Image: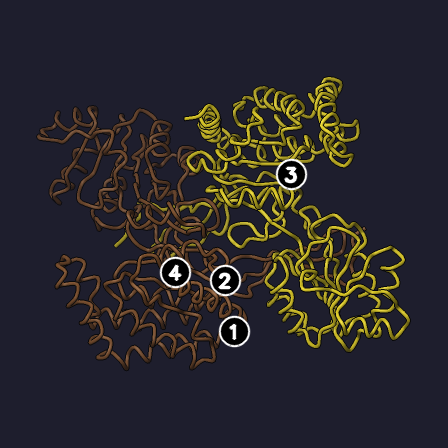
Chain colours: A brown, B yellow
Amino acid sequence: MTDVKIYMQDLGRRARLASRAMARANTATKNAALLKMADLIDAQTEHLKLENAKDVANASAKGMDSAFIDRLTLSDKAIASMVAGLRQVAELPDPIGQMMNFKPLPSGINVGQMRVPLGVIGIIYESRPNVTIDAAALCIKSGNATILRGGSEALHSNQALASIVQSGLLSAGLPADAVQVVNTTDRAAVGELITMTEYVDVIVPRGGKSLIERLMNDARVPMIKHLDGICHSYIDVDADVSKAIKVCDNAKTQRYAPCNTMETLLVHAQVAAEVLPTLCKIYQEKAVELRVDSATRATLESVGFKDLATATEADWCTEYLAPILSIKTVQTVDEAIEHINHYGSAHTDAIITENYSTAQKFLREVDSSSVMVNASTRFADGFEYGLGAEIGISNDKLHARGPVGLDGLTSLKYIVLGDGHIRT
Amino acid sequence: MTDVKIYMQDLGRRARLASRAMARANTATKNAALLKMADLIDAQTEHLKLENAKDVANASAKGMDSAFIDRLTLSDKAIASMVAGLRQVAELPDPIGQMMNFKPLPSGINVGQMRVPLGVIGIIYESRPNVTIDAAALCIKSGNATILRGGSEALHSNQALASIVQSGLLSAGLPADAVQVVNTTDRAAVGELITMTEYVDVIVPRGGKSLIERLMNDARVPMIKHLDGICHSYIDVDADVSKAIKVCDNAKTQRYAPCNTMETLLVHAQVAAEVLPTLCKIYQEKAVELRVDSATRATLESVGFKDLATATEADWCTEYLAPILSIKTVQTVDEAIEHINHYGSAHTDAIITENYSTAQKFLREVDSSSVMVNASTRFADGFEYGLGAEIGISNDKLHARGPVGLDGLTSLKYIVLGDGHIRT
């Protein structure tokens, strides 16, 4: 075995052992650990900033761009936000041990389910040290052990944070190994983490598409992940035009970078002339580049729009994450649904309509993790959905789908209560 | 591409397309297809038996054993049971389209979930033609398309059944491609099926441990599976001895081959002398071989038991599927839990106790897909749990855990109902 393999297997063994203690830990103990971590971060702000400064200096010397440095930097605001996050997670209801769905059966046994932790969660993320605290907090609250592998440029910051997390765990009587931060920048460590099926129950990658694509090729441990958010809004023939304009403006322009931002607008041909000129004027005023099909071009040019780009096949498949919007005019709701199911990424798609049956059809037939009526796709978020937390968004179908909160880090086992019952 | 790869990719493409129509199909349509299949099987009994006779003749010529031939043979009883099964599945509630968990949120949106099919399910099984109908029925009812790959010795039988299934689908206006049976015995077909992640959403292997181990090495598509059922019963210090004897007799001897049969009995040292002699006498009368640790041996030999086998380390890890039972005496409930979590297979484990706190501890800390109090492990079954059906049992933690019914072949998507709501 290579050194990295030996090292990672050891982390795995310790995590598996710690996961048993975490599964048994009661709510008060887990909360005490989280609150202690918040206090320690608060008290060690200067130390954290010193460690972080080493990472920032190295990254700057390597010529990383300013967006990268921003994400890497533990500013006072970023530190305060970590502290607040820990206290918020402590206040969330504990999902573990919740019992539900009990029913008495003809044999006399009573069968229900109990929510339990998944076990060991591997989290792989980029050079954003705040994710170390965020991920650790969610795993602790949900009774899991975790192995964290952050971007190598954040190594000093993450080690300093890990030491605080482990102090918090120990002060509450929980095993320090419940949260381990991989302390090597060797990329082989990631390869081990995503294949140690005996020690790791699920991988949650938090990062861009390229990270996730890389992991997908090699992972043997199941992942909770989404690749892209190619989100659509469809303005139906029966849309309320003022709602359509308000919602589709918000879905595209409230923020450009999130995965739940609209990337393609579909419009029913019979309302295109009524809705598109006003809406596209708003987009252009906000400097959103429009890429349109020929029918949409005809509608817009007839009222004086000029120099519109043509949407190509590639546009329908692209998550711009930028002030660019592709627009297509469709003849029917079925055409809209077909376009979404074909070109979309099963993330979040919305219809704007006042027609009950059309709304029901869209809700039922669009095969995405979130489907909306008369609402902005930007709502697809664990906090907006009332989950109280978000470890990520999944557009897979097994296990958790859509925004994943604490429950997504748990499983349900069956509980059978008998009184000496036997099977006959 | 090899011929097999081209063939399987074509099945995959067709299944994906058919899955869209299946997801849209209403309950009446799906039930009509199931009932038509039942009628057709009833009407074509003689034809089915002729096709099946070819398989049986080939298998006999190959020297397959009588248990194999039994499972392969479509007797009148087996055919009647397939017909009854189809009619039962038609009567089950349709899980698809069920909406739940709606709650209004501070932003004004209303967020809930809708149950939807997984999409395309690959089912891999041995030479038991009845599984073709059973699996097809569950996939149809849950709105999924399926690709079935049965054992090669059942090829004629499965093709005859597939043709009936497809007639049933067409007669109800559903696509014949919703249920496709792989018509090649080339084993490379399995390799394709379990790696076509673009066309197959989940694999359900139905068969023995060796089949599943083989698939696990190569599968890229997620699986709903369990490997073994090393099930335990633990007789606590506070057990009601008469319940303990009744339940532990049943757990071992009601049937020997099922995965939910007890393989290891754990007994608290303080009740061993009271419970073991009576219970072990029952086992010996039923010709169950006992393999015991030294403390259990001492207890039993002191009352005249002789020639007891010694349980080795391997016994604690073995699913006998036979009239053999390993017995260990433990000092505490913690020792029992640790033994189960270490040696068990996370399938089904039971405690016999009258002590409330001990029962709660066992329920919470035993990390298995079914955990029971005062009931026989033999109850771990989709029908006994009131699921109305069972596609298999999962001892994994992601997605479905324990007996998997129709709901296990579905997923929940988020539904957001707004009225022109935007995110601010």
Q: Residue at x 24, y 32 (%)?
A: A314
Amino acid under disc 4: Thr
Which callout, 2 or 4, points to the residue nearer the camera? Answer: 4
Mark 1 or 4: the one toward you: 4
Residue on which disc 3 sits: B92
Q: Do the residues indicated by labels 1 and 3 lie within the same chain of the protein? A: no
Q: Disc 1 marks which residue? A: A26
Q: CA distance from mark 1 to mark 3?
A: 39 Å
Q: Chain of mark 4?
A: A
Kind of residue at disc 3: Leu
C-alpha span from label 2 to label 4? 26 Å
**What separation in Å lies between label 3 and label 4 (alpha carbons)?**
54 Å
Q: Amino acid at mark 2?
A: Gly
x and y, in percent, of residue B330 in the image: 71, 73
Q: Which residue is mark 4?
A: A2
Q: Is residue B412 left or right of residue A164?
A: right
Mark 1 touches mark 4? (CB < 8 Å): no
Please tell me whether mark 1 or mark 3 is closer to you in this view: 1
Tag nearer the camera, 2 or 3: 2
Q: Is the residue marked by circle 4 packed among few (<14), some (14-19), or many (20+) residues within 10 Å?
A: few
The residues tagged by marks 2 and 3 sit, at their Cα atoms, a distance apart of 34 Å
Report the chain holding disc 3. B
Query: Depth check: A292 or A3 in front?
Result: A3
Kindly identify which residue carries mark 2: A119
**Where A64 falls versus A260 (above or below)?**
below
Q: Position of residue B13 (x, y in %)?
A: 44, 27
Q: Name the residue nearer the viewer: A283 or A129.
A: A129
Mark-to-mark CA distance, 1 and 2: 15 Å
Nearer the observer, B298 or A104: B298
Can you give x and y, in whole percent of width and height, for residue A213 in the image? 33, 46
Q: Is residue B362 left or right of residue A144?
A: right
